[in-house]
Image (tube, coloured by chain):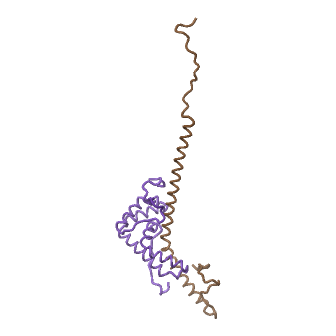
Amino acid sequence: MPPPGGFESVKYKRNLPLRGPGAYAILGGVTAICAYGFYRLGKGNLERRELEREKVWSRIHLVPLLTAEGDRDMYRRQQAALAREKAIMKDVPGWEAGTSVYNNPKYHTPEIVVL
Amino acid sequence: MPADVPHVEEVGVTSAPLKSAAFFIGAYCKEYNEDFMLCKNENREPGHCLKEGRKVTRCTIDLITKMREHCLSQWDEHWNCLEKKNQEYYLCRPAERKLNACMFEKLGLTKTIPGTPTGQKPIHEVENPIYKPIQK
């Protein structure tokens, strides 16, 4: 005999908890985040290029000043070396002080530096 | 120095003040700098461009005295910042803006970076850059 009120209905429905957003939502979300990240990266690369240009130009603007200063020092040393050579070699006949050992009129920085 | 070469004072500032003033030196002494570099292009010998070199140095000294007169506090602030921050411009923008404003107001010199793409804000004027100091 059935109980009063009838039998309770058969439990056949699956009872699973909600498992979060679907696969496409996650895929879309990850794609969106990555796209934003790459956008920022690209912007950052462009900006870094500009920063590099700024740095390079700050150095370019200082090149004449620093070269001029270095040249004066180099010239002073050259003249001193020439005078020294003349004084040392004054007894040697036919010695030309300050002539290069190379057969090339182009300037090159001296290999021997007297400190 | 041989006696026939006129004496010229050296600039006498270290790397950070020079870096801070670099763009103003480039703007203020443009003719002398270009003259000197063209002369160097002619001949690399140190003795060849002494005259032009002296002009470059005198012009820079002139600018530095003017900067000391007019914008000393801003300049000091900026180059001290550069000194502490690895001499990177992008870490010292607030101090740099103050210096740039003062230089424009008092001496009429602006900082321009050659080669900036047209229609783009120069990097030193960008309000919200991506590269900025992490430490505030």
Question: For the point 49% across and 66% down, which residue is it?
Answer: A57
Q: Which chain is purple?
A: B
Q: Which chain is brown?
A: A
Give the answer, above or below, for where B108 lies relative to A13. below
- Residue A6 quadrant: top right
Question: For the point 42% across and 74% down, which residue is it?
Answer: B61
* Lateral position of residue A17 relative to residue B84, left or right: right
Residue A47's x, y, as percent? 50, 57
* Lateral position of residue B91 relative to residue A90, left or right: left
Give the answer, above or below, for where B19 lies relative to B49. above
Residue furthest top in the image: A1
Residue B15's x, y, as percent? 48, 68
Residue B75's x, y, as percent? 40, 65
Give the answer, above or below, for where B63 lies relative to B4. above
Question: For the point 46% across and 79% down, which residue is it?
Answer: B54
Viewer-nearest residue: A47 or B89: A47
Give the answer, above or below, for where A30 lies relative to B48. above
Residue B85's x, y, as percent? 47, 60
